Image: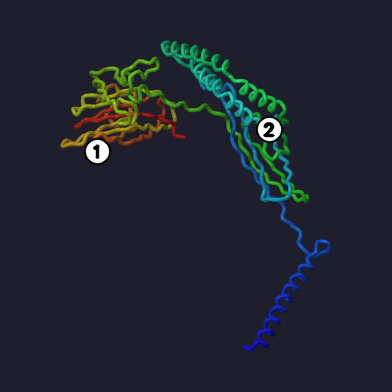
Amino acid sequence: MDTKTYKTMKNYLFNLKYVAVGALVSLASCVNDDLPEVGDLPDFTGPTPFYSTTDVSSSEFDCDDNEITANYDFNFKAGSNLAVNGTMYEWTITPDTEIDLINKDLPILEQSIANADAAVVGIQSEIDKIEFKIPCETDPAKVAVMQATVADLKVDLAAAEAARTPETIATIDDLNAQIAALPAGSLNDQEVIFAFPSPGDYDVALKVTDNLGKFDTTEKSFTVLQAIPTIPVPEIGEAGFEDGDLFDGSGDGRDSWRSPSSSKWGSVFQINNTSVEGRLPEGFQAAKFPADGSRVGYQEIEVTPGATYVLTYFSTVDPGANFGDITVSVINPAAADLAQAQLPANIIASKTSDNTATVQDVFTNNAITFEAGTLDKVIILLTNSGAEGRLDAFQISVKQ
């Protein structure tokens, strides 16, 4: 290509570049919001409302499961598909009789006070728990220990109150002032707590309007259920087989596991001690069952009829030439002796672990699920055969 041809081609490309730029400028000039029916199309997308709920209700029952108080409070939070444009909210509840509206920030401020005054609140909470349990306790010895514990805690409470710093006091005062200044909840709040007066069915509607005046409504039926007593977690005495683990600070790790008759059930197990932390699943003691199977563990626990429970524990059986196993059973208290406890009709649930694949001194975790049925008590029975076995760290929970 000669020089003349090159310059001509270069000029052509240069001119073509500016023709393209000019075309873009020309097109851009046509997009003018000032011209009628020309430019950006208006947004016809309206709001699509939805809402979520969180149960923040609370209730309290006495020893006989009679309701003392019940607050049927639910947090309602509105939303829509709009990421832009302002939105306005309007809640409607049917029936709306005696429904109170609570500002969503009230629980947050109350929790902030509890956090700022954690030492005092924590001690007072322990006092409240024990004082609530005292009327339900029928054992005078346990009542005496609980009352003594409350007296000691009240001394600690007074000391914690006196130890509040000026900064802590100022923070608490400020938070209380914020609570006093909070406006009541409103049916136009995006997020609000509805305090329903009682259980029942309610229709909750939410209308969302954007800043262009477009709106839509969603409505759902909402059911408030009657408060029911919380199923208590049964207490297993000396569940980790440690010394001094009874309610009064006594116990040799197995006092809770002695049967009502050693002639009918067998003698209580032995205790395996170690001074090495972490060698056992929990603490420094475990239940030990000699290879001859002559020792047992027996403990009655209270359960709630109709409830389902999960019993967990750790076990190990010494490996060796002899086959051996260890069994944890949940037994109907109608069984009067060890022989009756082994009848299928009296076995509610049971699990046996053997030494066919065990490693020396290595514990495995086990779980047994059982239903209380009509019973208000069951027996936890511990037995073994053939080889030395050990158990540790029992726990029980209510299956939800």
Residue farthest left in this picture: 321
Looking at numbered disc 2 in the image, what kind of residue is underneath it?
A: Asn
SS label for mark 2 = strand
Q: Residue shown at 72%/35% (left/top)?
A: 186
x and y percent of residue 394 in the render? 35, 29
Task: Using residue 81 as the reference point, say whether residue 306 is left or right of it.
Answer: left
Q: Residues within 10 Å of mark 1 (few under 14, many from 20)?
A: some
* Vertical placement of residue 151 versus 68, above or below: above
Q: Which mark is residue 103?
A: 2
Q: In the displayed structure, does residue 354 sit left or right of residue 370?
A: left
Is tag 2's residue or tag 1's residue first in the polypeptide sequence?
Answer: 2
Q: How many marks on residues? A: 2
Instruction: Name the residue nearer the viewer: 70 or 264.
Output: 70
**Residue at left 21%, top 36%?**
319
* Residue at point 68%, 80% (across, down): 13
Quadrant of image for the N terminus: bottom right
Q: Looking at the picture, how far across and down is residue 69, in whole percent?
A: 59, 23
Circle 2 packing at 10 Å, graded few (<14), some (14-19), many (20+), is some
Q: Is residue 148 visible?
A: yes
Per the image, the residue denoted by label 1 is: 359
Residue 269 in picture, x, y percent from top left: 25, 23
Determine which quarter of the picture holds residue 254: top left
Q: Residue at x 83, y 61 (%)?
A: 34
Which amino acid type is marked by label 1?
Val
Q: Is residue 340 visible?
A: no
